[in-house]
Amino acid sequence: MSQIKIVNIVGARPQIIKASAISRAIRRYFSTEITEILVHTGQHYDKEMSEVFFDELEIHKPDYNLGVGSAGHGRQTSMMITGLEEVLLKEKPDCVLVYGDTNSTLAGAVASSKLHFPVIHIEAGLRSFNKTMPEELNRIMSDHSSTLLFAPTNAAFKNLMSEGFRPENSPPYTIDNPKIYFTGDIMYDNTIFFAGLAEKKKAKWLEKLALVRNEFVLATIHRDTNTDNIERLREILVTLKSLAEERGITFVMPLHPRTIISLKTKLNLLYKELSESKYVKIIPPVTYLEMILLEKNCRMVITDSGGVQKESHFFKRPCIVLRKETEWVELVNNGTSRLVDADPERIMQEFKCLMDSLEVLDYPGFYGDGKTAEFILKEILLMFEKS
Ligand code: UD1
Ligand code: UDP
């Protein structure tokens, strides 16, 4: 078989991290069979939201950066589609990889499927069953434009079946005859690969932040529902601050630029109070190695992030989820993730329960064997052998 050409599309922070698992597996195991063209839409562009990951995770610099930047959903997505169309027409790949549920995922799926390049969706099938989330629309539309769909969990696989995808489909696979897989999660591949390295390279960094292992809480907030609705953001942050101060435990919060912008422009007084609190450390977004070090060594995670919910599980840390629902339902069913929305009472109740409980929580391996990227690439190669 001659080499196949894959266009790998990233744009937002978690996609760069996810794509690094695929890039690494191509380099290690499939470099003679696969050529990878990396395209960055430019959705995230601050150094600490993009460039740091290329350096740290040893991904080669993007072959193309569309430099789209921030804008409303329609404008941002349409600029990405326009830019991607040009790249795809020039590169003529055998297939296109998209990750997750961001506007970059949707743009990649739309641009590729309209040009009849097979779309491979990694992290397919996840559903919140809340279509007011931009991500839910992005996921559904991307899944239904895809030829190979890799579901990270059994629940995601079942969601695809209930939307009419048939596991019994046989090759040749096409957009009209797609193939679905239950694979495990490539983010788990990364965690396994980088956890030791994080300890080795960054151990001193915790000390620099004056963080004591197992004696701090890690919190992140970036979801639009929590950052654009100022009352919700205020309630969450006031609650976290009072929990930190009541307990005398440090809350470290690497905040997304979106959250910082809301704080600075609309909650300036609260921002000042948080910055002055002895027990709250608001810091800029951290690198992936720093983040996994925080996750591995914290007492508990509080977040509205999808990726951080799972990583807390990988590191056997309980997680309070600042959302009404989650796509990672197995964590909630397992009792180690607790959904609290932005309700101060529920945040406080679950925090106290998790801090004071003597119960030993169980963290089963829901997310595969750490070799998901390899599996995905083998299946992609198989598709081209059989077609
Ligand atoms: C996006 C994804 C979300 C994902 C998140 C990961 C969509 C619809 N949402 O949300 O699913 O969880 O990425 O982090 O695609 N900004 C900067 N610098 C940057 C990037 C963003 O200042 O480098 C600010 C801008 O003010 C921008 C805002 O953050 O308007 C939101 O950025 P955007 O990429 O639209 O959405 P995210 O909230 O990052
Ligand atoms: N992350 C990071 N630095 C940070 C915050 C998050 O490296 O300051 C990593 C985190 O470890 C996870 C991913 O980014 O791998 C999650 O991205 P994010 O929370 O932005 O988006 P989501 O997963 O909700 O789409």
Image (cartoon, rainbow, N blue to C red):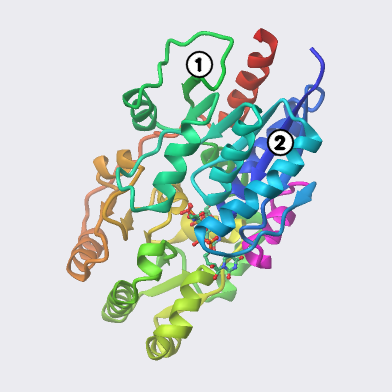
Crowding at dot 2, Cα within 10 Å, few <14 / some 14-19 / many 20+, comes out as: many
In this rendering, the answer to whether 385 lies above or below 86 is above
In this rendering, the answer to whether 255 lies above or below 180 is below
Query: Which residues fall within the magenta stretch?
Result: 45-60
Q: Residue at x 27, y 40 (%)?
A: 334
Residue 16 picture location, percent across and down: 63, 49
- Quadrant in which the N terminus appears: top right
Which residue lies under the disc numbered 2? 7
Q: Residue at x 77, y 30 (%)?
A: 92
Which residue lies under the disc numbered 1? 177
Q: Amino acid at mark 2?
A: Val
Is 109 situated left or right of 32 in this image? Answer: left
Q: Which mark is residue 306?
A: none
SS for dot 1 = loop
Crowding at dot 1, Cα within 10 Å, few <14 / some 14-19 / many 20+, comes out as: some
Q: Amino acid at mark 1?
A: Asn
Residue 184 in view in this figure: no
Q: CA distance from mark 1 to mark 2?
A: 21 Å
Q: Give the foreground label among 1 and 2.
A: 1
SS for dot 2 = strand
- Quadrant in which the C terminus appears: top right
Q: Residue at x 71, y 49 (%)?
A: 83
Q: Earlier in the sequence, mark 1 or mark 2?
A: 2
Q: Residue at x 32, y 60 (%)?
A: 322
